[in-house]
Image (cartoon, rainbow, N blue to C red):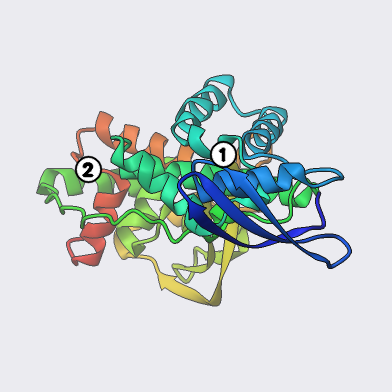
């Protein structure tokens, strides 16, 4: 990793850039390079310095994909990520230390202008930021420019699809049945308005089947290519379970291990799998809604 740092880059004339460098001995150097852009001039300046060089964005991504493969991520998923990252070929060969946050933002905006959807660009930003985070941790670079890019996806408000009375009745019947993780998820979503990540974070001791209450201490969140991570709330909240659940909470408590929802192998229930399995069950019984729709129904007072 180079100890030298680039102070500034300015264009003297078309294709010629002047780069101010502070070298390892704290000496200020001024060099000129031919390049198509300021990022190219930065990369050329860093490449001209003696000593080991920081890794390029492409090398950081390769390193990150190797880590994902070692963690057991599907080959198809990694191949999809590699294909997505081709949209950033313009900066793939640049050292991470030579890419400024503004340049990273311009690269994403350039990809969007070439027809890449904003959602895909946001996913690109997330993947590159994760690659930079691992490269930083392993000493392969000194900065992570994509983590500092204020690039987000403005999401339009999701339209609320009304749930039919028969759909609500079917969902209530499933929640009150008390058998399985999906039934618990339906009961807690429709009865208390909880999110799947909050349900996965409930410990066995947080459920009081006698008093019909459940304590929510935080939420398990999802991250692209990474395991779920837990975010604790500043203060735990105690929610009252609705009476229509009947004896279902007692069944949940009897089947619980250290957590309310625990796999047979003793691992915590995954957020994505809980959501997809429960939504599939709701589809099979013809409820005409998803967990998100049930949470909206609770918020609107329809439960």
Query: x%, y% of residue 171?
Result: 26, 45
Q: Residue at x 63, y 35 (%)?
A: 61
Looking at the image, the residue that sits furthest to the bottom is 235
Q: Secondary structure at mark 2?
A: loop
| Marks 2 and 1, how far apart at CA | 28 Å
* Residue drawn at point x = 39 percent, y = 36 percent: 276
Query: In the shown orientation, is residue 264 left or right of residue 293?
Result: right
Q: Residue at x 33, y 36 (%)?
A: 116
Q: Position of residue 183 (x, y in %)?
A: 39, 44
Residue 64, given in percent of the width and then of the height, sits at: 66, 36
Q: Residue at x 61, y 53 (%)?
A: 259
Viewer-nearest residue: 24 or 95: 24
**Mark 1 residue element:** loop
Residue 48 makes an appearance in the image:
yes
> Who comes first in sequence, dot 2 or dot 1?
1
Residues tagged 2 and 1 counted as in contact (Cβ below 8 A): no
**Disc 1 crowd, CA 10 A, few/some/many (<14, 14-19, 20+):** some
- The image shows residue 211, relative to residue 38, as above or below, that is below
Q: Nearer the viewer, residue 122 or 54?
A: 54
Quadrant in which residue 30 is drawn: bottom right
How many numbered markers are drawn? 2
Apparent side of residue 155 relative to residue 260 in the rendered image (left or right): left
Is residue 260 among the parts visible in the rendering? no
Residue 153 or residue 297, whichever sits in front: 153
- 163 lies left or right of 26: left
Placement of the C terminus among the 4 image quadrants: bottom left
In the figure, 39 relative to 148: above or below? above
Q: Nearer the viewer, mark 2 or mark 1?
A: 1
Crowd rating for badge 2 (residues with CA inside 10 Å; few <14, some 14–19, many 20+): many
Q: Which residue is mark 2?
A: 289
Kindly identify which residue carries mark 1.
Answer: 225
Residue at the limit of the structure toward the front, as seen here: 13
């Amino acid at each position: 990793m180079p100890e030298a740092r680039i102070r500034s880059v300015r264009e003297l004339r078309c294709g010629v850039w002047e780069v101010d460098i502070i070298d390892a001995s704290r000496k200020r150097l001024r060099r000129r390079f031919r390049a198509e852009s300021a990022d190219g001039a930065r990369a050329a300046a860093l490449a001209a310095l003696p000593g080991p060089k920081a890794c390029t964005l492409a090398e950081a991504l390769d390193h990150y994909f190797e880590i994902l493969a070692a963690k057991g991520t599907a080959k198809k998923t990694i191949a999809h990520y590699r294909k997505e990252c081709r949209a950033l070929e313009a900066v793939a060969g640049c050292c991470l230390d030579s890419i400024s946050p503004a340049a990273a933002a311009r690269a994403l905006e350039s990809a969007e202008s070439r027809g890449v959807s904003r959602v895909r660009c946001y996913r690109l930003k997330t993947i590159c930021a994760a690659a930079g985070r691992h490269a930083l941790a392993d000493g392969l670079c000194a900065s992570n420019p994509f983590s500092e890019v204020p690039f987000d996806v403005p999401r339009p408000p999701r339209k609320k699809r009304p749930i039919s009375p028969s759909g609500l009745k079917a969902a209530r019947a499933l929640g009150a049945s008390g058998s399985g993780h999906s039934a618990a998820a339906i009961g807690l979503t429709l009865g208390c308005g909880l999110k799947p990540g909050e349900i996965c974070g409930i410990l066995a001791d947080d459920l009081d089947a006698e008093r019909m209450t459940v304590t929510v201490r935080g939420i398990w969140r999802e991250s692209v290519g990474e395991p779920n991570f837990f975010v604790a709330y500043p203060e735990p909240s105690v929610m009252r379970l609705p009476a229509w659940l009947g004896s279902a909470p007692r069944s949940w408590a009897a089947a619980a291990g250290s957590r309310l929802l625990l796999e047979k192998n003793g691992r915590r229930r995954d957020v994505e799998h809980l959501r997809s399995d429960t939504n599939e069950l709701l589809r099979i019984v013809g409820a005409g809604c998803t967990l998100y729709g049930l949470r909206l129904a609770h918020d609107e007072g329809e439960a």
